[in-house]
Image (cartoon, rainbow, N blue to C red):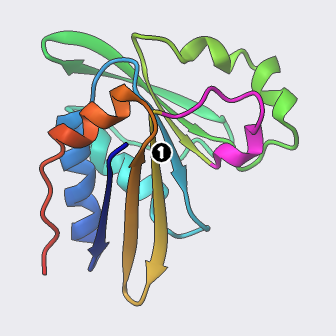
Amino acid sequence: MQHFTAHLHDEEGTAALGAALARALAPGLAIHLHGDLGAGKTALTRALLHAAGHTGTVKSPTYTLSEPYSIQLGGRAVSVIHFDLYRMSSAEEFLDAGFREDFNGDNVCIVEWPEKAEGVLPPPDLNVFLTVAGHGRDVELQASTALGNSCLQRLKFAPNM
């Protein structure tokens, strides 16, 4: 499976990666975001959603656990569902909320803190690891399915040096 690594020097680099990911999205894609608090998971998601055409506010779903957004992909209406599982106390909460049903061939699901639903969360097509490094971030994207692989093949991103 393919992978991609880069150093993002600043917030603009994170936003540029989010925009590049938006251009590589496909319906059914599940993306798991990994990183400590402040690593840029929500900033990356916000940039992705704005680049994908969402014009309103993108808030962190820390308290609501999920926020849906409607975008157009290839002329087709697609829901991007942003999950933040940080406040979940058990994986069963994920099941009780009915979130598994959102992971299908139609939606794009982006999950912050996927380890909080380990064992019940559907596996990702793409893992994104963000690590604070100096004033910037190191990022690694790892495809784990054919859909994730095709996303990385479409990814056109050159970090600013």
Give me the residue at 78% from left, 20% from top. 95
Q: Position of residue 149 (x, y in %)?
A: 31, 36
Q: Nearer the viewer, residue 2 or 83?
A: 2
Q: Is residue 118 magenta?
A: yes
Residue 66 counted in the magenta span: no
Residue bearing the label numbered 1: 59
Asked if residue 136 shows in the view, the reply is yes
Label 1 neighbourhood size at 10 Å, few (<14), some (14-19), many (20+)? few
Q: Nearer the viewer, residue 154 or 90?
A: 154
- Across and down, in percent, residue 52 comes to 22, 34
Q: Which residues are magenta?
A: 113-124
Q: Position of residue 82 (x, y in %)?
A: 50, 35
The structure residue drawn at horizontal position 51% and vertical position 50%, both measured from the top left corner, is 33
Q: Could you tell me which secondary element the residue under label 1 belongs to?
A: loop
Quadrant of the frame with the C terminus: bottom left
The image shows residue 84 at horizontal and vertical percentages of 61, 43
Vertical arrangement, residue 32 with respect to residue 134, above or below: above
In the rendered image, the vertical position of residue 86 relative to residue 29, given as above or below: below
